[in-house]
Image (tube, helix red, strand yellow):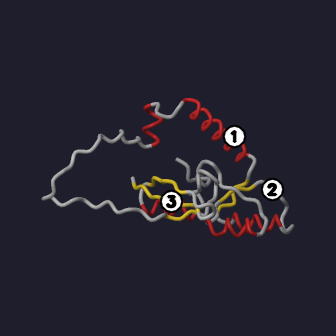
Amino acid sequence: MITFDLECRAAGHRFEGWFGSSDDYARQQERGLVSCPQCGSVDVIKAPMAPNIARKGNQLTVPTAPSPPAMPEPSQAMAKGAIPPEALKVMQAMALMQAKALEQSNWVGDRFAEKSRAMHYGEAEPQAIHGQATVKEAMELLEEGIEVAPLPFPVAPPGEAN
């Protein structure tokens, strides 16, 4: 697990993100899955971080106050009941609503931006679609006045789910 300090360029909000690896962060960023928890902007960058430099072996240790226990990873937190039951219910309800909405939506894969433009400009019949777009593609769609939004929970392409 790797932790990055992140910042949204839209409002300068800083927050922390946990990822499986640097490559995992890059893939999620490219798919527009990394967003600011305060304003929802997907224009997010890595913020400067202080390096974690170990002290020399010949230095004395200075006693410090005990640090609070580390937060468990989200999956462990759920298993141990660290997430308040109310929050868990809200997340489950949101996941159910997303699943129901996607039942009436067509998967267009990486042609999401192309299909969205075609519908917006009257070149294709309007319909509910979902797919993948890079952050750049999503920002361009928004600049053109085409309403798009990231899904709250990741969606596996058809045929790729476990």
- The residue that appears at 77% across and 54% down in the rendered structure is 128
Could you tell which of marks 1 and 2 lies nearer the N-terminus? 1
The kind of residue on which mark 3 rests is Leu
Label 3 residue SS: strand
| Nearest the eye: 66 or 114 | 66
Query: Mark 1 and mark 2: span between their CA atoms?
Result: 18 Å
State which mark lies toward you, 3 or 1: 3
- Binning the other alpha carbons within 10 Å of mark 3 as few (below 14), some (14 to 19) or many (20 upward) gives many
Q: Position of residue 74 (x, y in %)?
A: 46, 42
- The residue that appears at 21% across and 49% down in the rendered structure is 62
Report which residue position mark 2 lands on: 127
Q: Position of residue 2 (x, y in %)?
A: 40, 55
The kind of residue on which mark 1 rests is Met
Report which residue position mark 1 lands on: 97
Query: Mark 3 and mark 1: span between their CA atoms?
Result: 29 Å
Q: Position of residue 151 (x, y in %)?
A: 65, 51
Label 1 residue SS: helix
On residue 6, the disc is 3
The kind of residue on which mark 2 rests is Gln
